[in-house]
């Protein structure tokens, strides 16, 4: 089955330190991968996506993600975490279903950045 | 610049009652969908639509109905609410969902539903 997995329910990091939120995928064909962020009591906001081209994708708020085909991963990274980055992060992949590419989301990873 | 608008934001229902969650988008998106978000379960797709007059089931469709009579609107109907439907519901929309599409989808702010 085509899917995306986020192996960590929660990631804790100190402010100023680098952060990584992990995502692995399982799809046939070329993957279309996305990261979204959800702040408390809000909808999901798009951060970045990988379609093709450079494996390192840059997005909003200083985040970036690295596509690794051999490891089937698309980890989200930021060089220096901010307390305001604390939120729920979702990895997503568009999978083929009934002729349409439907977004499928991971379970989410709660990022907590400590002052 | 409305984007995706969901109403109501909060609702309390009694078991067995019916209601409709409204979703409207002003971006002329062909793709629209409903997700529910539950603790530890992430986002699960309920129903989706790739254009007016076309709907399909997602991962958890039971207990929910949808219709797509216009491009702008995609209401979600609960015919007989159950406590298991207590959740946060998100509507999302995106541009034409062609083969190999890498199009971004956009979310509404959510609707908090409690069934007692």
Image (cartoon, rainbow, N blue to C red):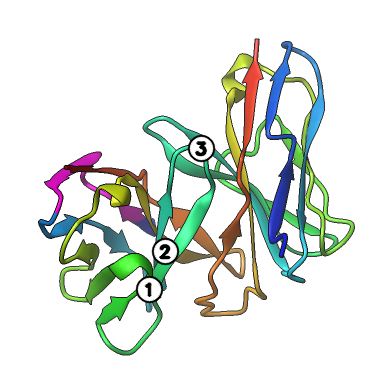
Q: Secondary structure at mark 2?
A: strand
- Against B24, is B36 above or below? above
Going by the image, does B114 lie left or right of B44?
A: right
Q: Is residue A78 left or right of residue B30?
A: left
Q: Position of residue B22 (x, y in %)?
A: 78, 43
The answer to whether residue B82 of the structure is visible from this angle is yes
Res. A33 in view = no
Disc 2: host chain: A
Whole-percent x, y for residue B30 in the image: 73, 69
User: Which residue is the site of mark 3?
Assistant: A41
Which of the two labelled residues, at mark 2 and mark 3, occupies the earlier sequence position?
3
Q: Which mark is nearer the camera, 2 or 3? A: 3
Task: In the rendered structure, find residue A31 and report the number of the disc placed on it.
Answer: 1
Which residues are drawn in magenta?
A4-15
SS at mark 1 in the image? loop
> Disc 2 marks which residue?
A93
For disc 1, the neighbor class at 10 Å (few under 14, some 14 to 19, many from 20) is many
> Which residue is rendered at x = 10% and y = 56% of the image?
A17
Q: Quadrant of residue A1?
A: bottom left
- Pointer 1 with pointer 2, Cβ within 8 A: yes
Camera-nearest residue between A5 and A66: A66
């Amino acid at each position: 089955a085509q899917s995306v997995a986020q192996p960590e329910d929660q990631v804790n990091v100190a402010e100023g330190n680098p952060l990584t939120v992990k995502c692995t995928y399982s799809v046939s064909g070329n993957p279309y991968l996305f990261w979204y962020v959800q702040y408390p009591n809000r909808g999901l906001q798009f951060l970045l996506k990988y379609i093709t081209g450079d494996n390192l994708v840059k997005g909003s708020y200083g985040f970036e993600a690295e596509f690794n085909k051999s490891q089937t991963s698309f980890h989200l990274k930021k060089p220096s975490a901010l307390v305001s980055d604390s939120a729920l992060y979702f990895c997503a992949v568009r999978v083929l279903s009934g002729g349409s590419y439907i977004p499928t989301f991971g379970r989410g990873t709660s990022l907590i950045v400590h002052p | 610049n409305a984007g995706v608008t969901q109403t109501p934001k909060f609702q309390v229902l009694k078991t067995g009652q019916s209601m409709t969650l409204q979703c409207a988008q002003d971006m002329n998106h062909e793709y629209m969908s409903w997700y529910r978000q539950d603790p530890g379960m992430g986002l699960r797709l309920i129903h989706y639509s790739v254009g007016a007059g076309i709907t399909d089931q997602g991962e958890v469709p039971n207990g929910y109905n949808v219709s797509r009579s216009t491009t702008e609107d995609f209401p979600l109907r609960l015919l007989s609410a159950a406590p298991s439907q207590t959740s946060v519901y998100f509507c999302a929309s995106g541009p034409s969902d062609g083969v190999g599409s890498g199009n971004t989808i956009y979310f509404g702010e959510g609707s908090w539903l409690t069934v007692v």
